[in-house]
Amino acid sequence: MTDIDSSVSPPAALAERDDAITIDELRLATRNHGMPLEVLDLDVTPPGLHYVLVHYDIPLVDPATWTLEVDGHVDTPLSLTAADLDTLPAASARVTLECAGNGRARTSPRPLSQPWLDEAVGTASWSGVRLDAILERAGVLPGAVDVVFTGADHGVERGVEQDYQRALSVEEIDRGEAFLATSMNGVPLPPQHGAPLRLVVPGWYGMAHVKWLTRITVLDHAFDGFQNATAYRIKTDPDDPGVPVTRIEPRALIRPPGFPDFQTRTRVVDAGPVTLSGRAWSGHAPIERVEVSTDDGTTWSDAEVEPAGTDPYAWRRWTARWDAEPGRTVLRVRATDASGRSQPLEQQWNRQAMANSHAQAVPVLVRG
Ligand SMILES: Nc1nc2c(c(=O)[nH]1)N[C@H]1C(S)=C(S)[C@@H](COP(=O)(O)O)O[C@H]1N2
Ligand SMILES: [Mo]
């Protein structure tokens, strides 16, 4: 199937329990950066502070020669230029994106991959064109099952050489929420976020939002490409077919209070009244409740959550009062959504550490 052997592209592996981060993980971590958690103060994350995850290399696509091909199980295949996109109906939304591997480095034993802690998240105002308008123009034929989105980036992963590709079902697309973005926060997409065109699938984990789009292919059968069939699945052993990773599990994060130690990031806070704040989101249903613990999960109280705005898949701000008493403690926060999903306090282990939304812990020193 490939001439790229396992010394170059090894199979999925777990670190030994309590093993230090490897040089391969560090290399990924310096390319793929998280959102500094103090930026949770902002409703919309500026590009550059939004997290970034790129499997292979960032392709530098020339918009002057770029085209979007629409083909497969359609009546009229299309080849659209950047100028053609301007003639299509507009779409936009403020959307919180989170990598499905967020929290991975805190799982044990952890899979060797991008070692996220809690910060693989960001919220942007994406705008561009309607996906259904493009598919209508191409004329999707009866019997369509999946739609494959192909990026301009190319690499090898666990021995499988590929262009980055993900499919969404026709049923999911028919919800009318997914669209194609040409801009982020009012400016053209920056290279790392998918210029000149990316897919946005509000409510879904990051892997669905294909960047650097070059092709949309309608299939009359289920897609079995690597990123759908192998990579983004919740499984307990490598041969288990597993369950596909789809929508974002509820999560809340604390904007770390006080000031940090440079090396350990432990927070220093003055004793007395403190307003804790942060953001909460879910791709399944509106956030219904955010609870905060200031004693490492022994007792919990409800935070105040701002009312839902017009964008159902954008994070919401929460605040809570804390009378901080001198000593060391750990702050924790957990969100529950209207579907009844809630954040576990401990890891829910799976082979690739996907959709692991266990509650954040923030060590704090309160000084008297
Ligand atoms: N073409 C392409 N699209 C991609 C990826 C990629 O490597 N190639 N990474 C995916 C993953 S795993 C995530 S989490 C999001 C990250 O989007 P961002 O970098 O804009 O935050 O992009 C997704 N889209
Ligand atoms: Mo991701």
Image (cartoon, grey):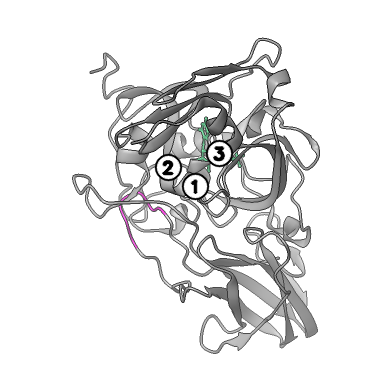
- Please indicate, yes or no, whether residue 230 appears anywhere in the rendered image: no
Q: Quadrant of residue 30?
A: top right
Q: Going 69% across and 30% down the picture, which residue do you hit? A: 88
Q: Quadrant of residue 295?
A: bottom right
Q: Going 73% across and 26% down the picture, which residue do you hit? A: 87
- As drawn, 180 above or below 322: above
Where residue 153 sits in the image (x, y, percent)? 51, 22
Quadrant where ligand 1 appears: top right
Where residue 237 sits in the image (x, y, percent)? 22, 51
Where residue 155 sits in the image (x, y, percent)? 43, 22
Number of the front mark, 1 or 3: 1
Specify the label residue 174 is tagged with. Answer: 1
Specify the label residue 170 is tagged with. Answer: 2
C-alpha separation, residue under disc 2 versus residue under disc 3: 26 Å
Q: Are marks 1 and 2 in contact (CB under 8 Å)?
A: yes
Q: Quadrant of the C terminus?
A: bottom right
181 to the left or right of 169: right
Lower position in the chain sequence, tag 1 or tag 3? 3
Q: Is mark 3 within 8 Å of ligand 1?
A: yes
Lower position in the chain sequence, tag 2 or tag 3? 3
- As drawn, 219 above or below 246: above
- Residue beneath label 3, please? 53
Where residue 159 sits in the image (x, y, percent)? 29, 25
Q: Are marks 2 and 3 in contact (CB under 8 Å)?
A: no
C-alpha separation, residue under disc 1 versus residue under disc 2: 6 Å
Callout 2: 10 Å neighbours few (<14), some, many (20+)? Answer: some
C-alpha separation, residue under disc 1 versus residue under disc 3: 27 Å
- As drawn, 151 above or below 16: above
Which secondary structure lies at badge 1? Answer: loop
Specify the label residue 358 is tagged with. Answer: none
Residue at the outermost left position: 239
